[in-house]
Image (cartoon, grey):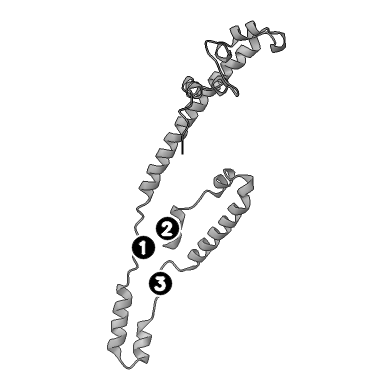
Amino acid sequence: MAARRISKSSIDWGKFASVVPRTEMHNFTAFKARSDAYLTRVLSYPENPPQINFDEYRNKVANKELVGKLEQAYKSLKINYPKENLSQEVDKQEADYKQQANAYVEIANSKIAQAEKLREKFELMIPYSSMTYEEFFLTFPDWSNTMAAPSIYPHYEKTPGLSKEEQAKYAAPDGPPYSI
């Protein structure tokens, strides 16, 4: 029975090892060794409890009723293993994390698409060293620093790759200073 329970929850150690960073590999090998030790210990136990020859005890013990009661108690012994009730919660958490990962992938893909457009723009423009200020501002109007759109160093609101919301957040003035 132990082997059947273990085989259902076995771990794909190769896949697990492929996602472990090199800096944590020593912790992973220690964890795998400990897990293997537990597995070996569980598998060393027999699947069923050992059979006891109660006839032999009846012949040797004077109190036959005691042996009968022990035999009845031994045969009625049932070890109830706890029911597995956490897999649904783990599956729910896995689905939530997959949603979060997919949302992150969508954001990353949109930023990659923006970066590709910007790269194409860089490939088509004249070299930066040959540009005048006017050509630069015509090529990159979002990055220009004019009286209509002033910016203060370090110009975070004009950083390439930020969304319009992020640029607006950086461009907004700070609130009033807090007094103590």
* Image mark for residue 49: 3
Estimate how packed mark 2 is, as few (under 14), some (14 to 19) or many (20 or more) residues with alpha carbons within 10 Å.
Answer: few
Q: Residue 57 at what x, y percent from top left? A: 37, 87
Q: CA distance from mark 3 to mark 1?
A: 14 Å
Q: Residue 140 at what x, y percent from top left? A: 59, 11
Q: Residue 72 at what x, y percent from top left? A: 29, 78
Q: CA distance from mark 1 to mark 2?
A: 10 Å
Residue 163 in view here: no
- Check contact, mark 3 vs mark 1: CB within 8 A: no
Q: Which residue corresponds to mark 2?
A: 5
Residue type at the position of mark 1: Tyr
> Which element type, helix, strand or loop, lies under badge 2?
helix
Residue type at the position of mark 2: Arg
Q: Residue furthest right?
A: 129
Q: In this rendering, would 92 be left or right of 174?
A: left
Q: Residue at the spot x=57%, y=43% of the render? A: 19
Q: Residue 126 at what x, y percent from top left? A: 68, 8
